[in-house]
Amino acid sequence: MTTEINKKIKQRSKEIRNNIKNSKGIILNNIILNDDFTEIYNRCCENILGYRKVPLGVSHTPIKINNLDFYIPICTFEGALVASMCRGIKLINKCNGVNGYVENLGITRSIAVEFSNFKSAILFYRWLKVKENLEFLKQAGEKGSRFCKIKSIESKNLFGSTVFIKITAYTGDAMGMNMITKAANQIFRSISDIFTDSELITLSANICTDKKWSVENYANGRGKRVFLNIRISEKDLLDVMKVNIDDLLKLYNTKIVLGGSIILGGFNCQASNYVAATFLAFNQDLGHVLESSNCILDMKRVGDTLLEINLLMPSLIVGTVGGGTHLEPACAFFKQFDGLEPLTNDPRDLSTSANYLALVIAAAVLAGEISGMCALTNNTLIDAHMRLNRKQ
Amino acid sequence: MTTEINKKIKQRSKEIRNNIKNSKGIILNNIILNDDFTEIYNRCCENILGYRKVPLGVSHTPIKINNLDFYIPICTFEGALVASMCRGIKLINKCNGVNGYVENLGITRSIAVEFSNFKSAILFYRWLKVKENLEFLKQAGEKGSRFCKIKSIESKNLFGSTVFIKITAYTGDAMGMNMITKAANQIFRSISDIFTDSELITLSANICTDKKWSVENYANGRGKRVFLNIRISEKDLLDVMKVNIDDLLKLYNTKIVLGGSIILGGFNCQASNYVAATFLAFNQDLGHVLESSNCILDMKRVGDTLLEINLLMPSLIVGTVGGGTHLEPACAFFKQFDGLEPLTNDPRDLSTSANYLALVIAAAVLAGEISGMCALTNNTLIDAHMRLNRKQ
Amino acid sequence: MTTEINKKIKQRSKEIRNNIKNSKGIILNNIILNDDFTEIYNRCCENILGYRKVPLGVSHTPIKINNLDFYIPICTFEGALVASMCRGIKLINKCNGVNGYVENLGITRSIAVEFSNFKSAILFYRWLKVKENLEFLKQAGEKGSRFCKIKSIESKNLFGSTVFIKITAYTGDAMGMNMITKAANQIFRSISDIFTDSELITLSANICTDKKWSVENYANGRGKRVFLNIRISEKDLLDVMKVNIDDLLKLYNTKIVLGGSIILGGFNCQASNYVAATFLAFNQDLGHVLESSNCILDMKRVGDTLLEINLLMPSLIVGTVGGGTHLEPACAFFKQFDGLEPLTNDPRDLSTSANYLALVIAAAVLAGEISGMCALTNNTLIDAHMRLNRKQ
Amino acid sequence: MTTEINKKIKQRSKEIRNNIKNSKGIILNNIILNDDFTEIYNRCCENILGYRKVPLGVSHTPIKINNLDFYIPICTFEGALVASMCRGIKLINKCNGVNGYVENLGITRSIAVEFSNFKSAILFYRWLKVKENLEFLKQAGEKGSRFCKIKSIESKNLFGSTVFIKITAYTGDAMGMNMITKAANQIFRSISDIFTDSELITLSANICTDKKWSVENYANGRGKRVFLNIRISEKDLLDVMKVNIDDLLKLYNTKIVLGGSIILGGFNCQASNYVAATFLAFNQDLGHVLESSNCILDMKRVGDTLLEINLLMPSLIVGTVGGGTHLEPACAFFKQFDGLEPLTNDPRDLSTSANYLALVIAAAVLAGEISGMCALTNNTLIDAHMRLNRKQ
């Protein structure tokens, strides 16, 4: 069977590349075809031309979080990204590492349901706020998977006969969009058993919000909410970054506080760089880079000689099961999370490794923030980019 | 020399992987090391572990835009993404293709400059609005590269003695962040020649905005602004998508219009999926997925039997020169743009292939939007994901 | 006593006006001083110069909502505002009135509390999510007033040792900011009894959000959330507005849907006009016009000859008790709500007239939206403004 | 004639009040009818019931701005508002007043124009970016009034055959919405002379943005952009406010910086309170409170003993001519601006008093911010509200 699939893909790739060559005169090189495709066939990609290669870098020393050690892989074409993170990790580790906490908010899906008229819609809207009814719907939603635990089903919006419903669920270590979509379908069926005039308009009503920037995710979070905290002595800051606290805080106040206020967003330096690069290295869904990059950086002086840095990432969408997470070498890095103590104490939340993955990605972001901010402070950013980011 | 670098990387990779194995008990497989790394060494990545593989799919038939044909490569781990795009392309081509226009807004960089006090800052702020002064600064900014053409230097914000300045420039076919950063540095030097009390606080003041979500990019655009337009007959829609116009518009009105209004954003179905997947296939900077995914979808009935679809993407950040764009097979796909007529008629805008790249990425988004919206309309989305997105 | 206060105010006013006259040469006319000030003295204003006059208009016929009749007072200097609303009411009443529902979300206040370090803060953050602890805090918050019923106490944000807490409460018919501020103070005291290392940084931490535009209020609502719905026959629309459904929907799609998507907000025509004008007439707090004007307008064709219009106002901040609501003639209009059936069935929500007030204000907005949109459709807006808004 | 109008209004008011009394049993008291209505009749209000009274307070000492003195009138029902502003003014004046600058951005109006198809729309879109064409349209727009000076006509958005156009103009001392609406009409006519397939969809396309919250106004400003700056010694701060710099900055960092980042907005304490209260006292359009309240507060320590406070208000919509600005006593306060030096040096900008009005309103906001923040810092806010804001 394996040979069949691989043969088929080779044959198909050849045909398409021939078409491209014949019609466009373009020869595609550097595509890997002598390989096994069974793990991605009909699962991760279609019309497969082969594998393409992406540079994989890594933090050469592990980063210390809550007194645990983690290696962070990075995939990127942008020079200086890995080096900058490693510089941040060096400082973080020198200060005994970063402290962090992950709150698993659960994944969300929203549906829109139409009733026969406004009054029926209002009736349902009020029905949905009764505890017993919610329990009934939650049970319906949990039938499909033992990992799926519905946290909440709520409505804040109604237009005429149409009610928007947002469903939130724990989904074990899976990112969980497929799991919750099925649960949403089940929940609607249970609604329609009772409200026989109801019709499903859409299983995805945009207020989830999945893969879009939205005030909903910004205000309420989605997936994993991560808090990080570290205190850095001025001496260590000077040693590693050649920057003092005053200069760094002046930059912080100008760029992040005022700059961020002006543009209403981006209260960070370059979070999306590290979200994207670690997402690719960990085989996460790159469509989620958008909302996962929400990030607020807080810097302040504490006492005479300490700098405190806090980071809040409210909507990291990650999983260690499902999607492309079974593929090597990404999945090997998840083994770092084996046997670790759960971060939650909610017995319904069966996620452990996915929560740690969120913690590690946030820590990579933090390392990048510290290093990037310091490079901007002493204006070495251009030099670093010229040195590590250009044709030699 | 080549052998030296490759040997060095192999050696280093071995060391790091040994460390990981020894400390964590983790063996990393499926990393390519017997390869050439000279093209990425000291340019695209550091602490290189090797290459990792990513599935590369492609539209098996080219998409028709402005009567031209383009193949669209896709890198993804998410099943159904390529198949769905191809379905969209099938319908688009059946309707004689999509019409599009790209406006090259230029890349932006912002700096923050401090003066000795508020009055000096105001003096400069007003000086900056005088035409001759702007010309003087523009010339300073253009010294570094013949491709760099400063479009505007403006300030909208001032706090006490600190003035925020936003610089916009054409940068040929390069994405241009390095080019404009150097130009910004030059512009500041010219400012400081005249305003001797001025000091540079930061070469990146967040109001650019680079790699963050912001109202600035949303309102004013950045990089390439792309407009697409297509009209589809109900017959073709039914043939390819098994959906009629009324049902599709009902979904559109609920999900995109109302859903989008509720969450203030995301007036599209899944733009970021295709932005991320094409960015990876074309070796674009994945940190830019965030702002590049801004996208407004417009659908309406025209006359009795036609559906009109329009797409606006105001801030696509792309380039065909620089970064990782020299690597195969990504760069081979850029050859599709060779010899095409420039989309601009501004003689200072030396970009052609980058503009076409933006057009093609937006068209991939459009194909994905049409197909995704239709799948939601007849509720086949779950089935497709179950079929193409799961362990067999 | 009354005479004392009035005499004192007259005296003080005279002094200030003399100062103004002497230093600026300005004589202030048209200020009412021969009046009673006891009801506003030390309660509604300080440094009182007197009363100034504002034009008070009214809908000459009551508007029909849920088969009940309400007169709507308006205070404004903008010609055409009252006339336009009355035109909208005429059409609404012709269609048997508007249907509406008010959900009392409660008023909100947020506080920021500092703990001795990050770990203590996390400890508290997790403590706050335990049901029993919440009950304990709720009881503490409800001690001050029998109308104050705490709905929720929650935290979504934490930076280092600082935790942000948002409190939501029913406050009877009062707008409730004073009531909930006192409750917040009590809640903090109970926190500090248990967490002895906790300190109150601020009783108002901006995430409430009070009198600022914010994603928090936009996404989650505040005060009263109002839903309105009406169906209008094309014949009635033509009769009253001289506009057909197609033309109106074309305007709606362009101005509200696309225009709103472009600017990320304002999915309405002129809601703030009527919010401000009715707030002034009903003696509401004009500082709340900002958030109360959040409003999404939805228009669509239903069947062949009907237009459906829906309105969502998620954050109307109103009260009929407290503040300036005791003053005539505003308070007289509240008598319209006497004896009406409560809109809620939550026994803890003791608000009735304030909910009806929200309903009436939203209906005024709706009347203004319909009339304004129709005037734009047949381009009579300029004419109306020229006729009713200019020096004769 | 005067008598006729007044008689008519009295008669009409009596009728309406009788209807209300008969149908609702409500008697409206405290409405002024024995007065002159000619100045507001057919100009500021319709269906006039009479005048209602609003408390008018004033800063008992003028505030010092740029070494000039201005009295600030306030209309409000919220106790403590005037007192708190006066406390802020006391501190400001003790520090030799505030420095400020006003940039008149001009008022904006947007229109949507439809062409026969996408290609025609693109043709026009590109035509609109040619300098000569813009000059031609500007001249058309300026025909109606010698005060109307078109600053820019630009398009950033196009959907299919529909182009959105934003027009910006100086309008003398008028707020200018009527003036620019007429100009927009003229500009469209000139467009349609050349593009004979063009049709006007709407004279108000929401992207202006008028009376709605929008990223457009937030990012680009509208009306007057005001910058304020003041430095306060710790001694003066302690004397007047009983607060030290460290405590105030801690509150600022928590409430404004972090709180503001969390809710994406409201980087101030209570700007809308003073915008609304001064707007009412100066007879400005209360519908503009929404966008005029955009405000970013910046506080930082300078050297050892100074606190620097900066305020940016990017979109104050004000005028001293037109609307209700001719009515006393509001108009009397404008006389403070007579004979002052223009704040602009653009000869086309004929506004002086309106710019000063913006300056004064922003200064009132600043005074309120300082006082409010200090009250929160030493937690006296509740006390003040209990003392000045409640039934005695």
Image (cartoon, coloured by chain):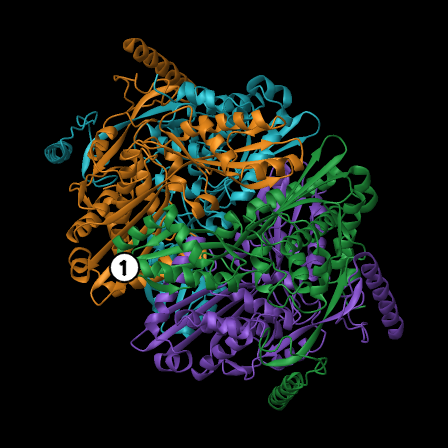
Chain colours: A green, B purple, C orange, D cyan
Image-quadrant location for residue A43: bottom right
Vertical side of A201 occupied by D209: above or below:
above
Q: Residue C145: image x %, image y %?
A: 38, 25
Q: Residue B300: image x %, image y %?
A: 36, 69
Q: Is residue B150 visible to us here?
A: no
Going by the image, does C188 lie left or right of A235?
A: left
Viewer-closest of B86 and C369: B86
Viewer-closest of D92 and C230: C230
Viewer-closest of B156 and B372: B372
Chain containing mark 1: C
Going by the image, does B79 lie left or right of D328?
A: right
Quarter placement of the C terminus of chain B: bottom right
Going by the image, does A44 lie left or right of D263?
A: right
Q: How many marks?
A: 1
Mark 1 surroundings: few (<14), some (14-19) or many (≥20) residues within 10 A: many
Quarter placement of the N terminus of chain B: bottom right
The residue at which mark 1 appears reads as C377
Q: Is residue A123 visible to us here?
A: yes
Task: Give the residue at x 66% y 37%.
Answer: C118
Image-quadrant location for residue A243: top right
Task: Give the residue at x 52% y 81%.
Answer: B63
Give the structural element (helix, strand or loop) at label 1.
Answer: helix
Q: Residue B107: image x %, image y %?
A: 61, 61
Viewer-closest of C170 and A250: C170
The amino acid on which the numbered mark 1 sits, given as a three-letter code, is Thr
Vertical side of D307 occupied by A55: above or below:
below
Q: Residue C345: image x %, image y %?
A: 30, 40
